[in-house]
């Protein structure tokens, strides 16, 4: 498993380095604002979190998603009770590189395939709509949808956050928008 993680991280690093070499400045819409090291660290956090959750709660791990951006981890999905809900936060918080954990896990039965497909469709719609906005650096914003709730993460300017939030709010099927941005201005 360790070799697989190392290979995955190497691939991510190479793709980021290639992207950084073509960077034309901070306003380039195609380049992530995180450093290559931070980007790789976020990928590692997601892999480790998935691993430790699987080890602790194998039967529920398929219902839990982890997303990391700049060391902030978003937990979404479904768990059976408050004990699992709190324990997942505890184990993810202890991982190296994790600065903060947002536990948005619902205490509920597993989501349906239909619900998962609807969430994927919403995420795709939000990202597609953002691509056509000049003031939204889509590659600098992570969009996650769970149960119709859209979570937005990224290193953004206030004006970018405002536009991205409005686009998400005005996308069909979105029940609520939660912003977890870090501001660079």
Image (spheres, rainbow, N blue to C red):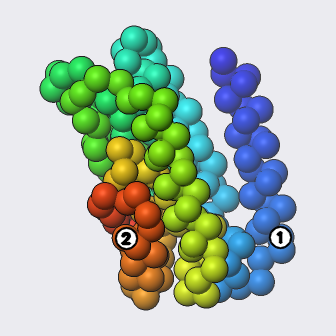
Secondary element at image label 1: helix
From the viewer's perspective, tell me whether residue 8 is left or right of residue 111. right
Pick whichever, 60 or 122, lies toward us.
Answer: 122
The image shows residue 59, relative to residue 169, as above or below, that is above
User: Residue at position x 46%, y 52% from top?
Assistant: 144
**Which image quarter is the N terminus in?**
top right
The image shows residue 84, relative to residue 29, as above or below, that is above
Q: Is residue 140 visible?
A: no
Q: Position of residue 153 (x, y in %)?
A: 44, 62
Pick whichever, 2 or 15, lies toward us.
Answer: 15
The image shows residue 21, relative to residue 42, as above or below, that is below
User: Residue at position x 56%, y 33% from top?
Assistant: 47
Secondary element at image label 2: helix
The image shows residue 56, relative to residue 43, as above or below, that is above
Residue 88 lies in what quarter of the image?
Answer: top left
For the residues bearing labels 2 and 1, Cβ distance under 8 angstroms:
no
Check disc 2 and report the residue beneath it: 169
Kindly give the residue lying farthest to the left in the view shown. 82
Tell me the tag on residue 21. 1
Q: Position of residue 27 (x, y in %)?
A: 64, 86
């Amino acid at each position: 498993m360790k070799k697989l993680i190392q290979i995955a991280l190497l691939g991510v690093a190479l793709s980021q380095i290639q992207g950084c070499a073509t960077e034309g400045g901070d306003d380039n819409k195609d380049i992530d604002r995180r450093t290559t090291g931070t980007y790789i660290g976020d990928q590692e956090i997601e892999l480790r979190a998935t691993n430790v959750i699987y080890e602790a709660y194998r039967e529920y791990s398929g219902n839990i998603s982890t997303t990391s951006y700049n060391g902030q981890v978003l937990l979404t999905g479904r768990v059976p009770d408050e004990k699992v809900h709190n324990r997942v936060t505890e184990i993810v918080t202890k991982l190296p590189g994790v600065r903060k954990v947002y536990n948005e896990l619902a205490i509920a039965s597993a989501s349906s395939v239909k619900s998962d497909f609807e969430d994927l469709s919403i995420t795709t719609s939000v990202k597609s709509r953002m691509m056509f906005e000049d003031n939204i650096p889509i590659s600098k914003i992570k969009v996650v949808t769970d149960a119709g709730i859209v979570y937005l993460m990224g290193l953004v300017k206030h004006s970018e956050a405002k536009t991205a939030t409005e686009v998400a709010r005005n996308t069909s099927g979105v029940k609520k928008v939660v912003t977890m941005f870090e501001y660079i201005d």
